[in-house]
Image (cartoon, rainbow, N blue to C red):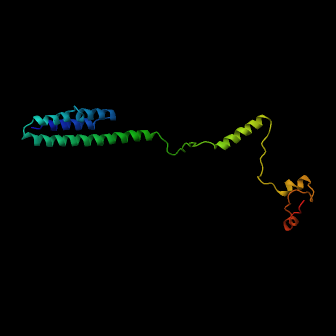
Amino acid sequence: MSHPLEELRAEALREIATAQDEATLEALRVRYLGKSGSISVWGEQMKALSKEERPVVGKLLNEARTAVTAELAQTGERLRADTESRALANIDLSLPGTATEIGALHPLTQMLDRAIGIFRRMGFAVAEGPDVETEWYCFDALNTAPDHPAPPRLRADARSSPAAPG
């Protein structure tokens, strides 16, 4: 004749193995291992047993609790893996990722953009060009005389002799 704990263990393992989702699995955990669960009640009844029965029932109780806990963990892992595989089945991994923009413009850049917007509304235009102009655009294209007192020119004759004080 089998002990009621062995029957309880077999019933719990059967129900846990047939659980279809994590909510059902959690309900089974509470039913068997919870504070007022079937296996926990046996633990509280150990006090009422005789000295001869305690080792036998204690061993069966520990085996049942260990087996149910292991089956809960294994079935939970299987259910999580199934849920994850169903979720990943709908994802096309060959598609490019979505780019996320991180950060913001520097405050000086924001102020420059605001100032440009104000001047454009006033009728001005933004002209862009090189940061340093050549001698041609600064002097020769403007028909500046070669002996003009502007800063020394970059010609060969100006490089060899210092500018005359003016």
Percent of width and height locating residue 21: 33, 34
Q: Residue at x 79, y 35 (%)?
A: 122
On the question of residue 21 being in view, the answer is no
Percent of width and height locating residue 121: 77, 34
* Horizontal side of residue 164 vs 101, given as left or right: right
The C terminus sits in image quarter: bottom right
Kindly indicate the quadrant of the structure image that contains residue 29: top left
Q: Residue at x 33, y 35 (%)?
A: 22
Q: Residue at x 58, y 43 (%)?
A: 103
The N terminus sits in image quarter: top left
On the question of residue 9 being in view, the answer is yes
> Which of 68 and 82 lies nearest the eye of the viewer?
68
> Which of 7 and 157 lies nearest the eye of the viewer?
157
Kindly indicate the quadrant of the structure image that contains residue 104: top right
Name above or below for residue 141 compared with residue 56.
below
Name above or below for residue 128 compared with residue 156.
above
Kindly indicate the quadrant of the structure image that contains residue 34: top left
Q: Residue at x 78, y 54 (%)?
A: 132
Percent of width and height locating residue 114: 70, 38
* Horizontal side of residue 86 vs 160, given as left or right: left
